[in-house]
Amino acid sequence: MSIQIETVKTADFKMDFFRFGNGGKALVILPGLSVQSVMTAADAIAEAYQSIADSFTVYVFGRRSELSHPYTIRDMAKDTEAALDWLGLKNVCLFGASQGGMIALVMAAERPDLVSRMALGSTTAHVQEAQFRVIERWIRLAGAGNAEELYLDFGRTIYPTEVFDQYRETLSEMSKGVTAADLERFIILAEGTRGFNAVEDLKRISCPVLAVGSFDDAVLDPDSTMEIAVNLDRRPDFRLYMYTGYGHASFDTAPDFRQRILQFFSD
C-alpha cells in the first residue's frame, strides 16, 4: 500500500492530508499531537483502519504547513473547517484523538453543517494547569533539542508499559530523523493547547457524540473525558466508554477501538 499525500491550498494556508477507502460516507480523522507529521505514517494508518475503508472514504488531516506562534486549538479548528469546505465535504463523521479531539469539539460547535456524528478519543474540553504539565515537559525537551528523550518520554507517557517496552528501540530510531524544524513545529502545536477551554461550546454541539477515554490516561487523566460526559450525558444520543489498561493512546492500543467507532458511525 502506498498512500498519496495531497494538499489543501486555500488563499490563506496549505494543509496536507491523505485519503483511502471506497465507502460512500466521509470519515474525517484528526490525529493528536505528534513529534513529526502524521503524513509520514500514512501507510500505517491506512492499514490500521482498513476494516473501516469498505464503509467510508477516510480523510486524515494534519495541521497547516506554515505555523507561527500563537496557533491555538481554535485556530486549528478554523483551518480544518476551511479545509473541509475546500474539499466540499459536509455532514462528515468526525473522529478526533487527543489534540485532534479538542479541534473536533470546536468544529462540531461552530460548524454543525460539517459534522453529522463525532467520536472523541482521550481528549478534553478544558486543558487545566495540572493537565498541561505533561505537555509542558515535552515542550521543554523539544526546546532543548533532545529529540530522543522527547520521543521516549512521549511514548512512555501515552502507552502502557508493556507497549512502550516493545517499541522503545523503534521510538529511539525514529527520533534520529527529527529535524530542528520538526521540534519548532511541535512546540508551536503543543503550546496551542495551553488554556484551551471549550466547556461552554459543548452546549452548542447538536450531533450524536461518542466519548472514549481511559481510566489510566497519564496525559490528560480520566477526569477530562468525564467532564465531557457530565456536560453531555443528559442527551440520549451521547455515548461514553472508558477503557482500563490501554493508556492515553487507547485509540491505538485497544484492539476493539476501531470497531467501536465504526459501529457508532454506522448506527
Image: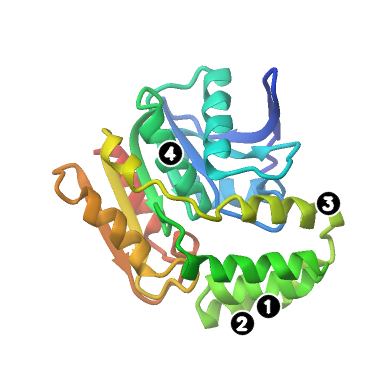
Crowd rating for badge 3 (residues with CA inside 10 Å; few <14, some 14–19, many 20+): few
Q: Is residue 229 above or below residue 136?
A: above
User: Upstream in the sequence, badge 4 or badge 3?
Assistant: 4
Residues at circles 1 and 2 in contact by the CB criterion of under 8 Å: yes
CA–CA distance in space, label 4 to label 2: 35 Å
Three-letter amino acid code at disc 1? Arg
Three-letter amino acid code at disc 4? Val
x, y percentage for residue 5? 70, 35
Residues at circles 2 and 3 in contact by the CB criterion of under 8 Å: no
User: Upstream in the sequence, badge 4 or badge 2?
Assistant: 4
Q: Nearer the viewer, mark 1 or mark 4?
A: 4
Residue at 39%, 77% (x, y): give it: 245
Crowd rating for badge 2 (residues with CA inside 10 Å; few <14, some 14–19, many 20+): few
Three-letter amino acid code at disc 3? Ala
Residue topped by disc 1? 168
Q: Closer to the camera, 252 or 182?
A: 182
- In the picture, residue 167 is in which quadrant? bottom right
Q: Quadrant of the N terminus?
A: top right
Left or right position of 260 against 135: left
Crowd rating for badge 4 (residues with CA inside 10 Å; few <14, some 14–19, many 20+): many
Residue at 43%, 44% (x, y): give it: 95
The mark found on residue 165 in the picture is 2
Residue topped by disc 3? 181
Q: Is residue 119 visible?
A: yes
x, y percentage for residue 80? 55, 32
Three-letter amino acid code at disc 2? Asp
User: Upstream in the sequence, badge 3 or badge 1?
Assistant: 1
CA–CA distance in space, label 1 to label 4: 34 Å
Q: Secondary structure at mark 1?
A: helix
CA–CA distance in space, label 4 to label 3: 28 Å
Q: Nearer the viewer, mark 4 or mark 2?
A: 4
